[in-house]
Image: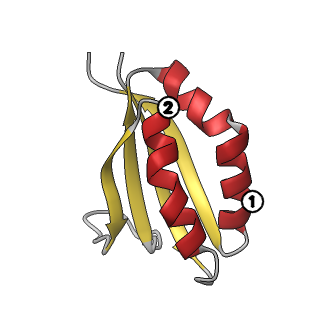
Amino acid sequence: MTAFIVGRMTIHSRDWMDEYFSAIPDLVARHGGAFRVRGGDPAALEGDGPLPDAAFIIQFPDRAHARSFWESDAFQALAVLRRSGSTLDAILVDGVA
């Protein structure tokens, strides 16, 4: 079953962004994934929580591919870089069967 990683990112500094965003699309693709949403300008539709600076949805063939990406050494190295200037909330969910 298709799986998605859904994330909300708050950006505190931009020093890390060029290196991170130049590497992440290829890494996602190597794990069978594809960005379905990647970017900024989130708009509130309901709720009163703070809006993130950016949001993303990455589609994978299944949870195993998604976890393989997330737990890979290459992604974890990029995650350390990302954490130097942002905060991320991310979840793994199944697609519609």
Q: Position of residue 41 (x, y in %)?
A: 30, 75
Amino acid found under the numbered disc labelled 2: His
Marking on residue 31: 2
Number of the label disc, if any, that sits on residue 80: 1
Residue 26 lies left or right of residue 71; in this view the side is: left
Assign a secondary structure to mark 2.
Answer: loop
Quadrant housing the C terminus: top left
For the residue pair 47 and 68, the one nearer the viewer reads as 68
Query: The N terminus appears in which quarter of the rendering?
Result: top left
Residue 62, percent across and down? Answer: 43, 20
Q: Residue at x 74, y 59 (%)?
A: 80
Name the residue: 59% across, 29% down.
Answer: 67
**Within-10-Å neighbours for mark 2: few <14, some 14–19, many 20+:** some
Q: Residue at x 50, y 64 (%)?
A: 21
Label 1, secondary structure: give it: helix
Q: Is residue 89 left or right of residue 38?
A: right
- Residue flagged by tag 1: what amino acid is it? Val
Counting from the top left corner in percent of width and height, residue 31 is at 49, 31
Whether label 1 touches label 2, CB < 8 Å? no
Mark whose residue sits in front, 1 or 2: 2
Q: Is residue 54 above or below residue 61?
A: below
